[in-house]
Amino acid sequence: MDPADDAALTEIRRLLGNSLSLAGGPAEVAGRFRAALAQAQPMLFATLPGGPASQVEQLADGLVWLAHHVDQPPMLVAGFGRLGMALAEAGVAPQQLQLAGAALAEAMRAGMAANGWRQDFDQAWRSTWQHAYEWISEGMAVGGYEPMVWSAKVVSHELRRPDLAVIRLRPYLPLPYLPGQFARVQVAEHPGVWRPYSLAGTPRRDNVLELHVRVKTFTGVSGSLVHRTGVGDSVRISRAEGSMILPPAGRDLLMIAGDTGVAPLKALLTELAVTDDPRSAVLFWGVRSMAELYDLDELVAIARAARRATVIPVITEGEPGPYPSGPVTEAVAAYGEWSDHDVYLAGPPVMLAETGAALMHLGVGPGQIHHDPPEQS
């Protein structure tokens, strides 16, 4: 770089950082920025994952990142290009961002004391945004033919059983998905190896993804996630896939899960609760023993928050306690009539095949049975 350019970028970094502090800090600025953008483009944030609070949090993180890296053009170009790809994945169009520069400048000005918003502050933010908008637009175009991969930070890691962990991840950029979908995950220990995991998070509320991971091999991806991954570590995630999602309205619902297959059904159950959906839903969760009911308290709490939802654990081996015992299909058959329900299945391949066959014997049509291919269960 030319020394004069280097000095100019250093000065812009100083102006961005100082003005961000004088305007109330990243969180306050981000809140005003989001409110202004939402007023100008009401549908913009409806297309992005998360609720208002989590979206403000991501905007605040982005403003801090921008202020810290504005004097590093290669990093800035790459970062905004990836942001453009992520926004395109969520369905955002370039024209929806055209007023963002003015909204950002106003969000800064509104937080300052009288006469605190100076011409050099205004020019620094507006010129920075103009470059950012160009790089974001280019990233949006690239996203049409280059697959997007997200980086995500582990924000919690709970070993619920010796062989199983519930892991929550926060992507650095918006990752759109629908309840019931899955995504492929890569860990640093196994570069180039991707394994599918269902996403049990709540995309309408926050930007946190939840994985339920059971160890298949100690040295593989699952073993790395369960035993050698901790809070603060990063993983890579592909775009969401899968068609096991709820229609906006329709029949009442029967859900049947085997072990960690409960993860996508937890997401569907949460969607019913968050949207106050009037449909009835019954979730049968088959496990070998009561000790394997690693997520029961959360599932029951979600069911209570929904209008008409019930969770029924089924113990296939050992002492069942207060729950039904034996094959899950027998418990389902004994519970009621399901021929007029939509059925969602998730679990091991053998469980999917056996349960699907049993349901058809109970009068459930093949078109009413939904599950992703066995690899994704």
Image (cartoon, rainbow, N blue to C red):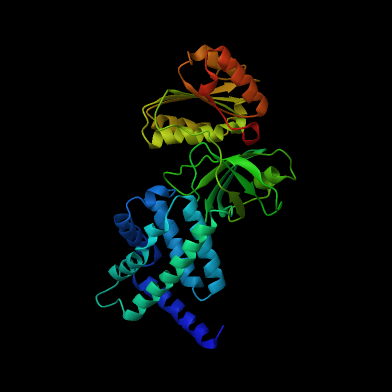
Quadrant in the picture for residue 259 = top right
Rendering quarter of residue 290: top right
| Residue for point 54% across, 41% down | 199
In the image, residue 159 sits, relative to residue 171, either above or below, namely above
Q: Quadrant of residue 158?
A: top right
How far across and how far down the image is residue 77, in percent?
53, 68
Q: In the rendered view, tell whether residue 25 sits above or below residue 175.
A: below
Q: Nearer the viewer, residue 111 or 92?
A: 92
**Residue 234 left/right relative to 309:** right
The answer to whether any part of residue 174 appears in the image is: no
Percent from the top left, x then y, of residue 279?
39, 26
Q: Nearer the viewer, residue 236 or 302?
A: 236
Give the total number of marks visible in the rendering.
0
Who's the residue at 45% across and 82% down the image? Answer: 11
Q: Is residue 35 left or right of residue 13?
A: left
Q: Nearer the viewer, residue 250 or 10?
A: 250
Furthest-left residue in this view: 114
Quadrant containing the C terminus is top right
249 and 191: which one is in front? 249
Residue 277 position (above or below residue 52): above
Point 42% across, 55% down: residue: 93
Name the quadrant of the N terminus.
bottom right
Residue 13, how many percent across, how many down? 46, 77
Q: Residue furthest bottom?
A: 4
Q: Is residue 134 visible?
A: yes
Above or below 167: residue 351: above
Residue 38 at what x, y percent from top left?
32, 55
Residue at 56%, 47% in the rendered image: 239
